[in-house]
Amino acid sequence: MNRAAYSLLLAAILCGCATPEVPKSALRLPESTLDIRSIQTRTLEASSETVILAATIAVLQDMEFNIDRIEKPLGVITASKVSDADDKNQKTGLILLDVLCAMGGGGGCDASSTAKDDQHITLTMVVLPNRAKAGEYKVRITIQRVIYDKMNRILVLERIDTAETYQTIFDNLRKSLFIQEGNT
């Protein structure tokens, strides 16, 4: 009986040690990751990383961002802004739904509270010097936004991946760099 119990215990231990096979594709990033990173990254030329950071601060303030954090030794800037996310058509439809609900005698109608209210946008920029070429820097920007409804519940949480958005920021950054470099 002891021998059978030990055999059963040994079999249970060995079965417990089996590891599931992980598909090789689970360890790979999706192809879209490279596309997104190429949209978010540019190579810029400047006399120093400080000049790029100063130009970025000017651009972000022009875009009505608040500078939340500057980590100069790391080349990182984090900025944010809150703006109105109201969709007038959505709001009108939800108010109409509330009115129809109230007319039908349905108490507690509050569809308009689910309308978009504010959007919180966070932008992070990282500047890395090119060790192979002096005066050249890789700059990567990432943008996220959270949209809240009237009851302060999260409706949308997303990364911004539109190429036009990043191109506009980088175009403005290049112009700001040109001005910064011209003044030094």
Image (cartoon, rainbow, N blue to C red):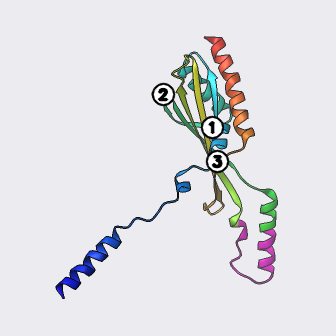
Residue behind mark 3: 31
Whether residue 157 sits left or right of residue 105 in the image: it is: left
Q: Farthest residue to the bottom: give it.
A: 1
Residue behind mark 2: 72
Q: Quadrant of the N terminus?
A: bottom left
Residue 100 on the magenta span: yes
Neighbourhood count class around disc 2 (C-alpha, 10 Å): few under 14, some 14–19, many 20 upward: few
Residue 161: assigned label: none
**Image location (x, y in percent) of residue 88:** 80, 57
Give 145 or 134, whichever is nearer the viewer. Answer: 134
Query: How many tags in the picture?
Result: 3
Q: Which three-letter amino acid code belongs to the residue tagged 1?
A: Phe
Overall secondary structure of the magenta section: helix
Q: Name which residue lies at 65% across and 37% down.
A: 38
The Cα–Cα distance between marks 3 and 2, rounded to whole angstroms, is 32 Å
Q: Are marks 3 and 1 in contact (CB under 8 Å)?
A: no
The Cα–Cα distance between marks 3 and 1, rounded to whole angstroms, is 31 Å
Q: Which three-letter amino acid code belongs to the residue tagged 2?
A: Lys
Give 70 or 32, whichever is nearer the viewer. Answer: 32
**Image location (x, y in percent) of residue 97:** 79, 72
Q: Quadrant of the C terminus?
A: top right
Whether residue 72 sits left or right of residue 83 in the image: it is: left
Element assignment for label 2:
loop
- Among the two numbered marks 3 and 2 on one chain, the one whose residue lies closer to the N terminus: 3
Residue 65: assigned label: 1
Instruction: Tell which tag, 2 or 1, sits nearer the viewer.
Output: 2
Neighbourhood count class around disc 3 (C-alpha, 10 Å): few under 14, some 14–19, many 20 upward: few
**Image location (x, y in percent) of residue 110:** 70, 72
Where 94 sits versus 36, above or below? below
Neighbourhood count class around disc 1 (C-alpha, 10 Å): few under 14, some 14–19, many 20 upward: some
The residue range painted magenta reads 95-112
